[in-house]
Amino acid sequence: MDNRNVFVAIALSMSVLLFWGAFFETPRKTAEQNNTQQVEKNNNKSSIAPTINQPIIIKKVTREEAINKNKRIKIENDNIIGSLSLEGALIDDISFKKHKQKVVDGENTVFLYPQETENGFFIETGWTSIGNKIKVPSNNSVWTVKGNNTLTEKSPVIIQWDNKEGIVFEKKIELDDKYLFKISQQIKNNTNNSIELFPYAQMTRNKIPDDIQNFYIQHEGFIGVFDEELKEDDYDDVKEKKIVRESNEGWLGITDKYWMTAFVPEAGKNFKSTFLYDEGFKANYIINKPTVINQSSTGINELRLFVAAKEVETIDSYAENQNIKKFDLVIDWGWFYFFTKPLFFVIDYLFKISGNFGTAIVLLTIALRLIFFPLANFSFKSMAKMKAVQPEMMRLKELHKDDKVKLQQEMMALYRKEKINPASGCLPVLIQIPFFFCNL
C-alpha cells in the first residue's frame, strides 16, 4: 500500500504538470505565434520601411587583438570594467569586477566581446532612414571624442560623427555606479531641409554561448516584456523564424543564466522589436514614429541599456527606481514565482547570518520540514490506517471478486467505518510539490 500511494502521488503530480503545459503554455505560445505572424503581415504591407543593415564582419581575431586594433574609451566603475570602440561607437568590451571565473585568484568574468571575435557580443545604437537615403553612421564609422575620454559614474562621455553632408551625430553616454548606461542620441541638422530619422538599438551575439544549459526550468535566450506581457524565445526558435512584436512600452534583451543585457526604449514611444538570426543572433528595436529635425535645429532620442549580473536586489531596485514594469522577471523564477522569490530572500537572509550557503540550505530545509510536519504527520497517519485495514480489504476482494459493484460498496462502507479517506495520504504530498520545484 505504501508503494501504491507513492505511485498515485507521482501520477497526480505528472497530471498537474501535463495539465499546465497543455492548457496554459501551449495556447500562449500559439497565440504568440499568431500575433507574430500578424505583425509580420502588417509590416509586409508597407513597401517602404526603415531598415537596420550593418556590414558582415569576418570573425577570426582574438579578443585582445580586436580591442587593441582601434581607439577606445575606457569604461569603469565599482562593478564593471571595459571599453567602448570609437569605430562604430560599439559597447563591446565589458567584464564584471565582482564576479570571478574562479573562486580563488580568478579573473573577471568577461561578458561582452568585440564583433570580430568568435564569441562576439556587442551593443550598437544609432539612426536609420527610409530607403537609407540619409548618410548615417555605421559600424565602420570612426567617432571623435569631445572632452573626457573615460566613462565613469561621475564622468559621462560625448562622442561625435559628421556625415560631411550637413548633419552631425552626437552621443552622450552616462554610467551609474552599477550596470545602467543612459544613452542620449542627438542630431544637429545644418542643412536647408528637414529630415526624418528613426532611432534604433541592437545587440548582436555571434553564436550560442558554449556554457548554455538548456535546462527546462531555466530560460536562456531572448526575453522581453511588451505591454506588460512577458515573452521568452529560445535561440533555436529565433534561428528558425524571425520574431517581430510591437509595443507601446516595455523592454527587451538577451539573458544568460547569471548575466543579462536589456534595452529600455524611450518612454511613451511605440516601437517594433525584432528577434532574428542573420550571421548572428540579434535583438533590436526601432521607434516607429520618425524624429523630424527641421533645418538648423536639433533632434534627440534617449534609451537605457543594462549590461548586468543578475543580482536580485540590484534588478529589483532598477525595476522600482527606473519605473520599468516587470523588469524583475529578467531573472527566471520559474513557474512558482510566488513561492520561489520569497524562498530566495529567506535563504539569502540565512546565508548572511551564517556566512555559508550549505548551512543556509540546511536551516531552510529544517524550517520547511517543521512547517510541513503537520501535513506529513497527517499523511503518515492516513497511510498507517490504510495499512491496518489491508487484510480486511484483501478479504473483501476475495469474497466479492466476481461482483465489482458489491466490492466497491463494501470498500466504501469499510472506509466510512474506519474513518479513512484514501486520498488523504496523497493530498499533503501534492501541496508540497510546488516547494519541491522551488528548491530545484
Image (cartoon, rainbow, N blue to C red):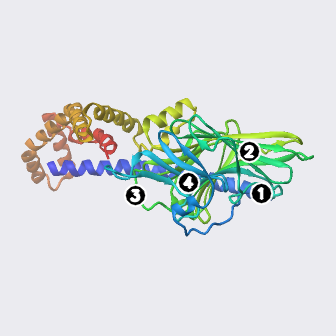
Residue behind mark 3: 213
* Measured Cα–Cα span from mark 4 to mark 3: 25 Å
* Between marks 4 and 1 in the image, the one whose residue lies nearer the viewer: 1
Upstream in the sequence, badge 4 or badge 2?
4
Amino acid beneath label 1: Lys
Amino acid beneath label 3: Gln
In the rendered image, the residue lying farthest to the right is 192
Residue behind mark 4: 30
Q: Quadrant of residue 351?
A: top left
Residue behind mark 1: 45
Tell me if I can see residue 426 in this picture.
yes
Upstream in the sequence, badge 1 or badge 2?
1
Image check: 249 left or right of 290? left
What crowding class fits label 4: few (fewer than 14 Cα within 10 Å), some (14-19), or many (20 or more)? few
Q: Residue at x 77, y 44 (%)?
A: 289
Image coordinates of residue 295 in percent, x first then y, are 89, 42
| Residue sitting nearer the eye, 318 or 223 | 318
* Measured Cα–Cα span from mark 1 to mark 2: 34 Å
Tell me if I can see residue 1 in this picture.
no
Q: Is the C-beta separation of discs 3 and 1 under 8 Å?
A: no
Image check: 410 left or right of 27? left
Upstream in the sequence, badge 3 or badge 1?
1
Secondary structure of residue under mark 3: loop
* Measured Cα–Cα span from mark 2 to mark 3: 40 Å
Q: Is the C-beta separation of discs 4 and 3 under 8 Å?
A: no
* Measured Cα–Cα span from mark 4 to mark 1: 23 Å
Secondary structure of residue under mark 2: strand
Image check: 160 left or right of 307? right
Q: Report the disc number at residue 170.
A: 2
- Position of residue 4 relative to residue 320, above or below, is below
Q: Residue at x 17, y 43 (%)?
A: 411
